[in-house]
Structure formats: structure tokens, C-alpha cells
Image: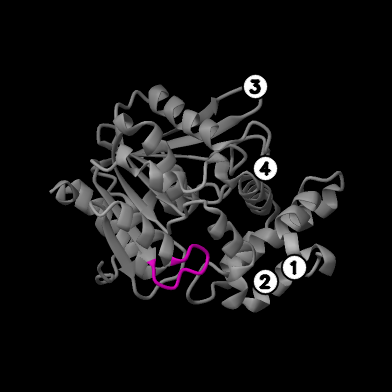
């Protein structure tokens, strides 16, 4: 385990040179984009959430002269349609979508980069298709166990009591012992206005707990309907089904990817996905390099975390992670 090194800036902003919409079934169409070097080493960025979507800043973790950078919005997220749709939205289907995108782009193998839910999906995808992966950069580890889901719903109150009070404020006292199903009834009921406000409450709760130091602009963005509907509806949907995975599946199947290089980056004060999950993953997968960032919470854009993530992409570029 290593603390963060000196802060490194993100790579400069860049624009996609290709983008499009990929219809993956009769209901879902995915937005995708490609930037950087068209002939470079492919890297896939998997966003968080579920439901978080990509942003232009996500392109900036990678040297555009070296990497062929592929990003996409998962089902129900970002520019993919329909927004917030939970029908036909499961982890196996997301994994199939990634393979469909890989084949469409004529990519044999790629480095897989994901944080939070993106790390969950990266592990699940890698374990399903190890032959398609060059390696992994994983941040803010979430293994989608029952204990982690319960922590999100109840445990974060120990650190962010005011945010949790706001999270439960609209839920009657007699329903608060089962917050997930209380939210389910409101998010997926017939009252559209109530569903939108409930999604907003969920998204703002998570947004309030992301950073070591408060970021008011991020919290404001979490209240935007387009972001809130993706985050609130899809996170609740995946929590209700425990990520469509068996308990501790990602740990039990680590042998499928043990031979591949990996870097795990974890904020010491991550309240959303506490470090114990990253530590458990590293214990099961000691071949992976674990970096605990001493001055960071959950968010990828905190300076110490961003520095270590960029260092990891550079280590893969120089093949240090293969040694």
C-alpha cells in the first residue's frame, strides 16, 4: 500500500473524434464516444452510479497521444436512451453491451478503467470476458455485497448525519427500517412528480458524501433532474437486485482475472465505499497493486486520487504494471 505522490494535473481537455448511438436491443440505445489516438492502445472508461453517465473530464485521465480512449453511457444513463429506464437493465446485459461495443469498434483487447460502480462492472466484465482485457485500473471499490448496500443506506449516517437526515426526511418513521423498499415504492410508483423528487433526494444524498472537502457545485449538479433520474432510479434498482450477482461473487471469481495486471486506488476517507472493500479485494488478489490515498474521499476528481489514477495510466503506458 502506498500513499499518493505529488499531485499531477489531468491531461488537457479533448474532443471526441467519433461518437454515435448503438442500439443494443429494442428498448435501449447507448451513447458512445472515442477520442485520443485512433491507432493507440484501447482503454475503456466505465462510469459510476449505476446511472452516473460520462462527462468530458473523464477523457482526461489518459495520454491522448498513446491511448485510444473509449467512453460510453450505460443503459439508462447520460445520453443513452431511455434515461432512467430499469427494464432490461441488469449486470449481465451491461456486460453484453460492453462486448457489443468492443466488437463494433473492432477492438481485440482493452485496458478497463472504472470507479465505484464502474469498478464493480469492470470486475464483473473482466471475470466474464478475461480474454478481452489487458488489465484494470479500479477506484473506490464497491463489491456490491449486502453489507455495502446496508452501509450506503444506513451506515453513512455515522459520518454524514445531516445528509442522512435529509435522505430520510420524506420517508415516514414507520418505513425507515427498510429504506430501500420505501424508496422503491416512490421511485417506481405512478406519481411522476414524487418519483422525480425522490430520485433527487437519493442523488443529493450520495453527492453530499462524495468528497473529503465539500464541493457545493457537485451537490447542486446532483439535484439536476437528468442526473438524479439516472442515479436515483438505477442505483435503487441495482441495490434491490444486489447488482444481479451472488453474494461476494466478485471475490470468489477473482481467479478468472488473477493473471492480469491491476491497480486499485482507494481514498482513505471514502465514506461511500469504505476502504475495507478495497482491502478485501487486495487480500484476495495480492498481485494487484493497492494505493491508499491518504487525503481523499470517494470522488475521482479529488487531487490525490486523480494524481494516482493518472500515474496508473502512465504505468500501463510504460508497462510498469506488467513487471
Q: Are marks 2 and 4 in contact (CB under 8 Å)?
A: no
Q: Are marks 2 and 1 in contact (CB under 8 Å)?
A: yes
- Dot 4 surroundings within 10 Å: few (below 14), some, or many (20 or more)? many
Query: Of tags 2 and 4, which is closer to the observer?
Result: 2
Residue 164 disc label: 2
Name the quadrant of the N terminus: bottom left
For residue 193, say whether it is visible: yes
Residue 84 disc label: 4
- Tell me the element at label 3: loop
Q: Is residue 8 left or right of residue 128?
A: left
Residue found 31% across the figure and 49% down from its top: 62
Q: Seen from this angle, which residue lies furthest right?
A: 191
- Range covered by the magenta-colored residues: 267-274
Q: CA distance from mark 4 to mark 3?
A: 16 Å
Q: CA distance from mark 3 to mark 2?
A: 38 Å
Magenta residues, dominant SS class = loop
Residue at mark 1: 168
For residue 220, say whether it is visible: no
> Horizontal and vertical percent for residue 323?
12, 49
Measured along the vertical axis of the image, is residue 134 above or below residue 52?
Answer: above
Residue at mark 3: 26
- Dot 3 surroundings within 10 Å: few (below 14), some, or many (20 or more)? few
Measured along the vertical axis of the image, is residue 143 above or below residue 129?
Answer: below
- Dot 1 surroundings within 10 Å: few (below 14), some, or many (20 or more)? many
Residue found 76% across the figure and 65% down from its top: 176
Q: CA distance from mark 2 to mark 4?
A: 23 Å
Measured along the vertical axis of the image, is residue 163 above or below residue 307?
Answer: below
Amino acid at each position: 500500500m502506498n500513499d499518493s505522490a505529488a499531485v499531477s494535473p489531468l491531461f488537457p481537455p479533448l474532443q471526441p473524434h467519433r461518437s454515435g448511438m448503438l442500439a443494443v436491443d429494442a428498448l435501449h440505445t447507448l451513447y458512445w464516444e472515442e477520442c485520443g489516438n485512433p491507432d493507440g492502445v484501447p482503454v475503456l472508461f466505465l462510469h459510476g452510479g449505476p446511472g452516473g453517465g460520462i462527462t468530458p473530464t473523464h477523457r482526461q485521465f489518459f495520454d491522448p497521444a498513446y491511448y485510444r480512449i473509449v467512453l460510453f453511457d450505460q443503459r439508462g444513463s447520460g445520453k443513452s436512451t431511455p434515461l432512467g429506464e430499469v427494464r432490461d437493465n441488469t449486470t449481465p446485459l451491461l456486460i453484453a453491451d460492453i462486448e457489443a461495443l468492443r466488437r463494433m469498434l473492432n477492438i481485440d483487447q482493452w485496458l478497463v478503467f472504472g470507479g465505484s460502480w464502474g469498478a464493480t462492472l469492470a470486475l464483473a466484465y473482466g471475470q466474464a470476458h478475461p480474454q478481452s482485457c489487458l488489465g484494470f485500473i479500479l477506484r473506490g471499490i464497491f463489491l456490491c455485497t449486502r453489507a455495502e448496500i446496508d452501509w450506503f443506506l444506513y451506515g453513512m449516517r455515522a459520518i454524514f448525519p445531516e445528509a442522512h437526515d435529509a435522505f430520510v426526511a420524506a420517508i415516514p418513521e414507520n418505513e425507515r427500517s427498510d429504506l430501500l423498499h420505501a424508496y422503491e415504492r416512490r421511485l417506481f410508483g405512478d406519481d411522476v412528480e414524487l418519483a422525480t423528487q425522490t430520485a433527487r433526494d437519493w442523488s443529493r444524498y450520495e453527492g453530499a458524501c462524495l468528497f473529503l472537502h465539500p464541493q457545493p457545485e457537485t451537490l447542486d449538479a446532483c439535484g439536476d433532474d437528468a442526473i438524479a433520474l439516472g442515479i436515483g432510479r438505477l442505483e435503487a434498482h441495482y441495490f434491490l437486485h444486489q447488482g444481479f450477482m451472488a453474494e461476494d461473487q466478485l471475490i470468489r471469481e477473482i481467479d478468472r482475472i488473477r493473471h492480469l495486471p491491476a491497480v486499485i486506488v482507494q481514498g482513505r476517507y471514502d465514506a461511500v465505499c469504505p476502504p475495507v472493500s478495497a482491502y478485501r479485494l487486495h487480500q484476495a488478489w495480492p498481485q494487484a497493486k493497492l494505493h491508499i490515498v491518504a487525503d481523499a474521499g470517494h470522488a475521482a476528481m479529488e487531487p490525490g486520487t486523480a494524481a494516482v489514477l493518472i500515474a496508473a495510466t502512465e504505468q500501463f503506458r510504460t508497462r510498469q504494471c506488467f513487471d
